[in-house]
Amino acid sequence: MTDKDSAAYTAPDGNYGFFFDQSLCNGCKACHIACKDKHDLPSGVNWRRVVEYTGGTWSSSEELPVPSIFSYYTSIACNHCEDAICMTVCPTTAMSRRDDGTVYVDPGKCVGCRYCEWACSYGAPQFNPEVGQMTKCDLCYDYRETGQEPACVSACPSRALDWGPIDDLRAEYGTENGIAPLPDPSVLKPRLVVKPHKDAQSWDSTNGEILNPMEI
């Protein structure tokens, strides 16, 4: 538990989201592992992923070109977006939103059509072949109901992750959420705040590439 008031953890009108401090993340993937372990996810189903993003440019010089190289990590899960496209495209209304603003999959309605997976630019909905349905991060609803933090937040050794009412996170950390390799935030309006790495690139930059596509 953090020093947050435990009552705030279960407030029904929280409109919860995530904060990620890119400057603190060392790519250890403890958040990814904790999520898989907590939810007993099979191989290939990853609700939280850590993206390795690297690239660079060359600057002009009278003598020799000077390289500018960058590399940083981005931990990403479902952002419980304001304009959640997964809910819009779901033909059975299985993609639902709780009173606290978090989006979850209703297993009683999901038919595994994967429309949500194809539509989400963050790759949040994941098809679980063991159950034949879509699954995704629900910000550890069961943990929050008992006053605990989401598993990924608790597991981060560098304290790069936080969560809470998105308005509170924005008031404390700012509003940045358009950092490469994440997509244009204006489309889905994610409930996410990112403290950028010192070399972070804008979402529309073409200077870098994802180095671990098989992991995400």
Image (cartoon, rainbow, N blue to C red):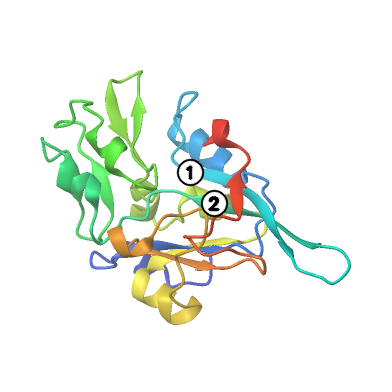
159 on left or right of 19 = right
The residue carrying pointer 2 sits among few (fewer than 14), some (14 to 19) or many (20 or more) residues within 10 Å by Cα, namely: many
Amino acid type of the residue that numbered disc 1 sits on in the rendered structure: Arg
Amino acid type of the residue that numbered disc 2 sits on in the rendered structure: Ser
Residue 125 at x, y percent in the picture: 33, 39
Q: Quadrant of residue 57?
A: bottom right
44 on left or right of 207 = left
The one nearer the camera, 166 or 202, is 202
Residue 101 at x, y percent in the picture: 25, 60
The one nearer the camera, 153 or 167, is 167
Residue that mark 1 sits on: 48
Secondary structure under tag 2 reads: strand
The answer to which of marks 2 and 1 sits earlier in the sequence is 1
Residue 87 at x, y percent in the picture: 19, 47
**Residue at 89% across / 68% down in the picture?**
63
156 on left or right of 185 = right
Residue 172 at x, y percent in the picture: 48, 80
Outermost residue, right direction?
A: 63
**Residue at 55% across / 54% down in the picture?**
154
Evaluate if marks 2 and 1 touch, with contact meaning CB atoms under 8 Å apart.
yes
What numbered label is drawn on residue 147? none
The residue carrying pointer 1 sits among few (fewer than 14), some (14 to 19) or many (20 or more) residues within 10 Å by Cα, namely: many
Residue that mark 2 sits on: 75
